[in-house]
Image (cartoon, coloured by chain):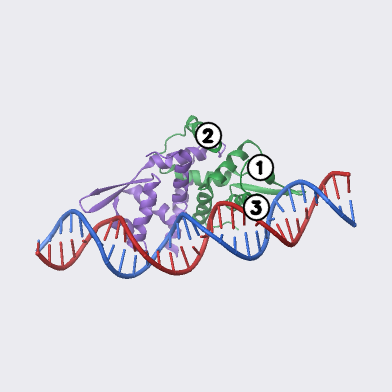
Chain colours: A purple, B green, C red, D blue
Amino acid sequence: MNAPLPDRLDLIFAALADPTRRRVLSMLLEDDMAVSDVAAPFEMSLAAISKHLSVLAAAGLIRQERRGRITWCKLDPDGMRAASVWMQGFGQFDPVDLDDFERFLEAEMQDWTKE
Amino acid sequence: MNAPLPDRLDLIFAALADPTRRRVLSMLLEDDMAVSDVAAPFEMSLAAISKHLSVLAAAGLIRQERRGRITWCKLDPDGMRAASVWMQGFGQFDPVDLDDFERFLEAEMQDWTKE
DNA sequence: GCAATGGTCAACTGTACGGTTGAATAATGT
DNA sequence: ACATTATTCAACCGTACAGTTGACCATTGC
């Protein structure tokens, strides 16, 4: 069930390469959500979002738990941490600047709403 | 010239999603290299590696500097750091464990030589 | 039971990607 | 000048991916 790490990194980074999926992750950072609720703010079909969620789940970035007829989506930080640790080795081991992170998130927000 | 951040993250994560390119980055972590030297340990054509290097350069993960007839490839930690910072926000802000990183690199190494 | 809601599956489309080969460009060595 | 080395370019191939639509389960409400 646990794929070799390089393959897992393939899945994780490929999953993160899509802006829609990154935006979904940011949404889940605030709260667990049902699939429909995740899909609501997007302009694409529910099926498309469902696929994106499958990609994120396969990468170990989220976990989906079906309860009744709704499927809850929950962030799974373990997948992300694996990739993050891998990447840290290239950044000259600088301490992480959380202010930077907030600015980045803001920049993404602006992009979603600008169009 | 500086693309909006989400687009940059697209490029960065997409570049990292390929195991060949991650392996190239690990090689460059040890030393700057000419294109041919980068290509040597791989079983694919030089042109293929050249393309991979272009992808990495476009993502801001490496920088290529042509001197004479050889093109030197050098790791550019800035691109990676941008993505790393973005990711840290999802990992519960845990401190980075460099021992983990070394184990990960080893795992990748094993995979390259296994076959 | 029946209709509505929540989500996935299947088939299709267009486009991007990883790889190949062969020719082209440019700098070096003799 | 000429051959060699270093690298890219161009055209092409197969496959994977993001999106669509429509049919297909489940589960809940009346």
The local secondary structure at tag 2 comes to helix
The type of residue carrying mark 3 is: Ala
| Disc 2 packing (10 Å; few <14; some 14–19; many ≥20) | few
Observer-nearest residue: A60 or A7? A7
Residue A66 seen: yes
Image mark for residue B110: 2
Left or right, A55 with respect to D15, comes to left
Q: Position of residue B39 (x, y in %)?
A: 65, 44
* Disc 1, SS: loop
Q: In the rendered structure, find residue B40 and report the number of the disc placed on it.
A: 1
Q: Which residue is mark 3?
A: B47
What's under tag 2, amino acid-wise? Answer: Gln
In the rendered structure, which amino acid carries the disc numbered 1?
A: Ala
Q: Is residue A40 above or below residue A84?
A: below
Give the chain of mark 2: B
Where does residue A72 sit, x and y in percent of width and height?
A: 27, 50
Q: Given contact means CB atoms under 8 Å apart, are the residues at marks 3 and 2 in contact?
A: no
Residue A103 drawn at (x, y percent): 47, 50
In this view, the residue in front, A37 or B45, is B45
**Mark 2–mark 1 CB contact (< 8 Å):** no
- Asked if residue A43 shows in the view, the reply is no
Label 1: how many Cα within 10 Å (few below 14, some 14–19, many 20+)? few
User: C26 or A73, which is in the foreground?
Assistant: C26
Q: Earlier in the sequence, mark 3 or mark 2?
A: 3
Callout 3 secondary element: helix
Indicate the quadrant containing the N terminus of chain A: top left, top right, bottom left or bottom right.
top left
Marks 3 and 2 on same chain: yes
- Write down the chain letter for disc 3: B
Q: Look at 45% across and 44% down and name the residue there.
A: B87
